[in-house]
Image (spheres, rainbow, N blue to C red):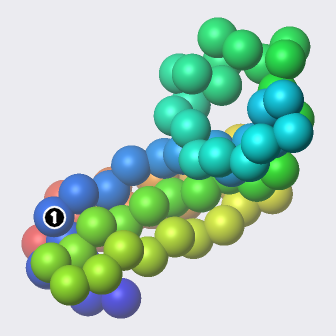
Amino acid sequence: MKLENLKKVYPAVWIEFEKEQSEMSLEWVEAYKDRVNILEYRLVFIFPEEEIREVFQTEEELFQAMVKIGEKLSNL
């Protein structure tokens, strides 16, 4: 993945809420954590021509990946 063309990157959570599945923000999930089932964590990369989602099983894995991406972006 070439980060030079990256337009936006953000964390998200794939959840099940009232029998519907959806991608939501970490903030939304924190507010409703007692009512949702977390299926996976995601890091979403927005490029001019595509979106790429990396999947993580835990919030800790997601945060570790965010730190690594931040380090790479600061070196561009």
* Residue 63 in view in this figure: no
Q: In this view, does 60 lie to the left or right of 7?
A: right
Q: In which quarter of the image is residue 8?
A: bottom left
Question: Residue at image x 79%, y 32%?
Answer: 17
**Crowd band around label 1 with a 10 angstrom C-alpha radius: few (<14), some (14–19), many (20+):** few
Query: Which residue, given by chain and number where applicable, does mark 1 sit on?
Result: 7
Q: Nearer the viewer, residue 4 or 64?
A: 4
| Residue 54 placement (x, y as % from top left) | 57, 71
Q: For the C terminus, which image quadrant?
A: bottom left
Q: Where is residue 30 in the image (x, y as percent from the top left)?
A: 66, 18
Q: Which amino acid does label 1 sit on?
A: Lys
On the image, the x and y values in percent for residue 41 come to 68, 51
Question: Is 34 situated above or below 3?
Answer: above
Q: Residue at x 74, y 48 (%)?
A: 21
Residue shown at the point (20%, 84%) measured from the top left? 49
Name above or below for residue 11 compared with residue 24: below
Rendered view: 7 above or below 25: below
Quadrant of the rendered structure where residue 34 is? top right
Q: Residue furthest front?
A: 19
